[in-house]
Amino acid sequence: MRKKVTLITGAVGEIGQALIQRLSESGDIDLITLDLKPLPTGVPKNVVHVEGDILDDALLSRLVSEYEIDAIYHLAALLSTRSEFTPTMAHRVNVDGTMHLLHMAAEQSERSDKPVRFIFPSSIAAYGLPDLATKKRDVRVREWEWNNPTTIYGCNKLYCELLGSYYSRNYQQLAVKRPTMVDFRSIRFPGLISAFTVPSGGTSDYAPEMIHAAASRKPYNCFVREDSRIPFMAMPDAIEALIGLEKAAVRRLRRRVYNVTSFSLTAKQISLLVIKAFPGTEINFQPDLKRQGIIDSWPADLDDNAARKEWDWRPNYDAERTFDEYLIPNIRERYAR
Ligand code: AKB
């Protein structure tokens, strides 16, 4: 008998590390984690870490033959700024990688005669507002509005949402009598902020970078204007959102892709919270034209009513709690060490 496991790709990324910690705490599920790199904090009990490439078909087939993969959190991706520098690589990792994993999930669903739950973090990058006047007018964007991404990463995410929906609906329907379906579920995340890791290659990175720089007593040059506004979320809420959607009863879900959000602040408002926590911090605003363009195309806020209604999504951390109870104490401790 094959052992039942949950697979996490991109395990060494920010979301990956936090998700592994949260899922391994409960100790009641076995995890296979996959990444090109080793896990930086060691391998917890109930976790088997595999160093390998999501584009390696032989490796994916070996995993399917050895384990009964019940659910997949497919987190591996290159973020928005990094992807603009290496669009071909971004396409390979973000799109080809997802395609390989979806195909593996379809194979696994057929083998175990049960749809594998495929959890995919998408992003506000899937939206693209044409100008600042529209961004000011259409503040809380709904899932079906402004799906015109301006970055390769946004295009990759939007297309993969469609690919996942395709694999859930009608993959092989023409070829075989009974289709092998995947239970694809996706979340469009705002910018995420973790107290324990610093992101790399994203465009929403100015918020976490500002906080971590202040805690380590370094000045920070913010690469967007003071009035730049996008939504954010504390990492623990992002993890609860992924698990909440994975556990949601299929009969309640009306969509495959959901917005989730917590608080929406301008870069100036974030800098004031940072200075309040770390008095004397020097923050300068020196906008980078390209990165500013990306932030200007992302919505100022998200409408997450569908997630609230269909799977009871609620963030636990608003801006105040994120700073006062999660970021500041944990970051202080981290840098004091
Ligand atoms: C990025 O900035 O690329 C990510 C995202 C918003 O998806 N943090």
Image (spheres, helix red, strand yellow):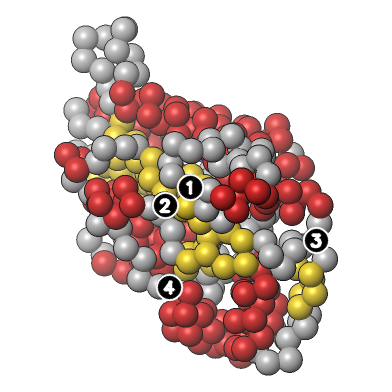
The image position of residue 89, as x and y in percent, is 68, 36
Amino acid tagged 2: Asp
- For the residue carrying disc 1, how many other residues have a C-alpha within 10 Å: few (<14), some (14-19), or many (20+)? many
- For the residue carrying disc 4, how many other residues have a C-alpha within 10 Å: few (<14), some (14-19), or many (20+)? some
> Nearer the N terminus, badge 2 or badge 3?
3
> Nearer the N terminus, badge 3 or badge 1?
1
Q: Pointers 1 and 4 in contact (CB under 8 A)? A: no
- For the residue carrying disc 2, how many other residues have a C-alpha within 10 Å: few (<14), some (14-19), or many (20+)? some
> Nearer the N terminus, badge 1 or badge 4?
1
In terms of secondary structure, where does tag 2 sit?
loop
Rendered image quadrant of residue 125: top right
Question: Depth check: 156 or 337 in front?
Answer: 156
Ligand 1 within 8 Å of the CB at mark 2: no
Horizontal placement of 297 versus 167: left or right? Answer: right
Q: Which residue is under mark 2? A: 303
Say which mark, if any, is on residue 141. Answer: 1
Q: CA distance from mark 3 to mark 4?
A: 27 Å
Q: Pointers 1 and 2 in contact (CB under 8 A)? A: yes
Q: Which residue is under mark 4? A: 318
Q: Which mark lies nearer to you, 1 or 4?
A: 1
Q: Which mark lies nearer to you, 2 or 4?
A: 2
Rendered image quadrant of residue 241: bottom left
Question: Depth check: 335 or 24 in front?
Answer: 335
Above or below: residue 253 compared with residue 296: above
Q: Is residue 240 visible?
A: yes
Horizontal placement of 294 versus 234: left or right? Answer: right
Above or below: residue 80 compared with residue 88: below
Say which mark, if any, is on residue 287. Answer: 3
Q: CA distance from mark 2 to mark 4?
A: 15 Å
> Nearer the N terminus, badge 1 or badge 2?
1
